[in-house]
Image (cartoon, grey):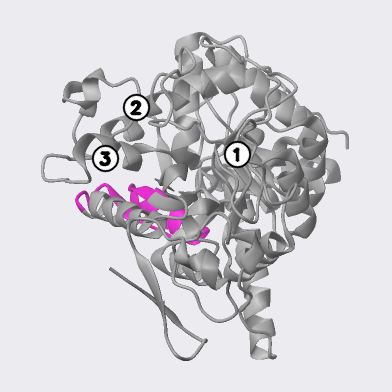
Amino acid sequence: MTSSITTCTVHWSCIQPVTPADALSSLQAISTVMIKTGAAAVTVVALALLAIQESSATPLPVRVSAKASYKERLAAARELLRESPLIDGHNDLAWNLRMFLHNKLHSFNLSADLAQEKPWMKSPFSHTDLPRLRRGHVAAQFWSVYVPCESQYLNTVQLLMEQIDVIKRMIAASPEETTLVTSPAGIEAEFHNGRVASLMGVEGGHSLASSMGVMRALYDLGVRYITLTHKCHTPWAECSETGGPAANSRGLTPYGKEMIREMNRLGMMVDLSHSSTSTVRDAIETSLAPVIFSHSAARALCDIERNVPDDVLSSLASNGGLVMVSFYNDFLTCGKKATIKNVIEHINHIRSMAGVDHVGLGAGYDGINRTALGLEDVSKYPELFAELLRDETWSLQDLKKLAGVNLLRVFREVEQVREKAVQEALEGETPSEDIIPIHDIDAYWPCRYKFANVDLERSRRCIFGLRVQFSVLPTSIRIVR
């Protein structure tokens, strides 16, 4: 008996996705007929059945033709983002709440169309609200917990707590549309529930006051990444900015490396945006978990220290880390103008250097005043994916990785390192009790409560009209008016 199989050609853009259940039913029916045509056909059907049975409950993906119209590609992009979560790594709306409203939310509603409300409608820094997040198919948003570098050595921790408080209050005011989550499982659950998952990341290690205890408290409050530096050096890490006071060390100090290890133990993602290249290399070498760049771009295309050089991009493959591409014109073209094509150039360059498993999205909305043309606010992500669908080298699975699957993988691997640390704790390992060496902070932070073994004369030179009194015992010092 001979067998014959008829083939046909179908235009991709005309095919409608089917569910695995529908495909399984169809293939089972086909297999009944094809069983008579020979073993080869049976093998093909059997393999197809096995693949479908092992697939998820999402519709089978069908890639639109690269030559399809823009309307068709945009529809396909939206369908893709309905099937797989889009996760943005960085949004500065919370700092705008401080600057515009002094953190008073009685007149603010994240569920409102802020593009039609003052003062948001007139600000070049305003790009975000829940209606636009939904139009943009954003499944999860990391809100930046930011305080200025000028607060370092002053009331930085207080300001940081106030920013966490305002983010939590902002989220709680729209419970039907968003909720705070702290894990990749939480992101996926809210994606299926139809709510935007809200997460927090602290932007700038200066906010920690060089304290392991503060860092652990931040994790308990729900923070899941810490950007090691902002535009200022910390006593333990060098930032990418030049022209200011010199750092204590190129890259990370020994205490800075201990901070990385404690972040690994906690399950806190290490964010290297804003860090100097030396700090980046030290952190990647030290970290047991994948690192992220929550909002950066490729230095090869815009040669500034703030962007990621090619040798670091190449090293991400072994670290497992991720660069989430910023939409800020100044990082994309080193100029005031950029377009959606410039964003894609950076995405493609990072993909070519690090691999498709190591690129994501971190636009930086609400913290930038110049956005790429075509990506003016958070509603425009489908337009980005519609453009990427013009490139046949991007498979649907790879586009899903870019959208959020890569970040979910990194997040899970960071959690796995934490789980290993928990197991080691059961065997005797404990949280780090290191404190920063006094010589790393004394020159910068003279006005602080001090304990034993300090320079008494230096302690007397305290600002704000405070004077220092010393107890009879040299083990304590108290500051009084």
Label ID, residue 163: none
The mark nearer the N terminus, 2 or 3, is 3
Residue 474 position, x and y percent, is 52, 86
* Mark 2 residue type: His
Q: Residue furthest left?
A: 106
Q: Tell me the residue at 20%/29% (across/down).
A: 113
> Where does the magenta region start and end?
173-197
When the figure is inspected, residue 150 is found, relative to residue 466, above or below; the finding is above
Q: Amino acid at mark 3?
A: Leu
Q: Residue at x 39, y 66 (%)?
A: 221
Would you say 389 lies left or right of 173 here? right
Q: Residues within 10 Å of mark 2 (few under 14, many from 20)?
A: many
Q: Residues within 10 Å of mark 3 (few under 14, many from 20)?
A: some
Identify which amino acid the numbered label 1 is placed on.
His
- The front one of 95 and 109 is 95
Placement of the C terminus among the 4 image quadrants: bottom left
Say which quarter of the image contains residue 139.
Answer: top left
Residue labelled with disc 1: 274
Which label number is shown at residue 97? 3
Q: CA distance from mark 1 to mark 3?
A: 23 Å
- Say whether disc 2 or disc 1 marks the residue closer to the N-terminus: 2
Mark 2 vs mark 3: in front = 3
- Residue 215 image offset from top left, x and y in percent: 51, 65
Kindly identify the residue that appears in the image at 55 percent across and 54 percent down: 444
Is residue 115 highlighted in magenta? no
Say what secondary structure mark 1 lies in: loop
Residue under numbered circle 2:
127
Q: Quick one: label 1 or label 3, which is nearer the N terminus? A: 3
Q: How many marks?
A: 3
Look at the numbered disc 2 and give the secondary structure of its residue.
loop
- Placement of the N terminus among the 4 image quadrants: top right
Q: Quadrant of residue 65?
A: top right
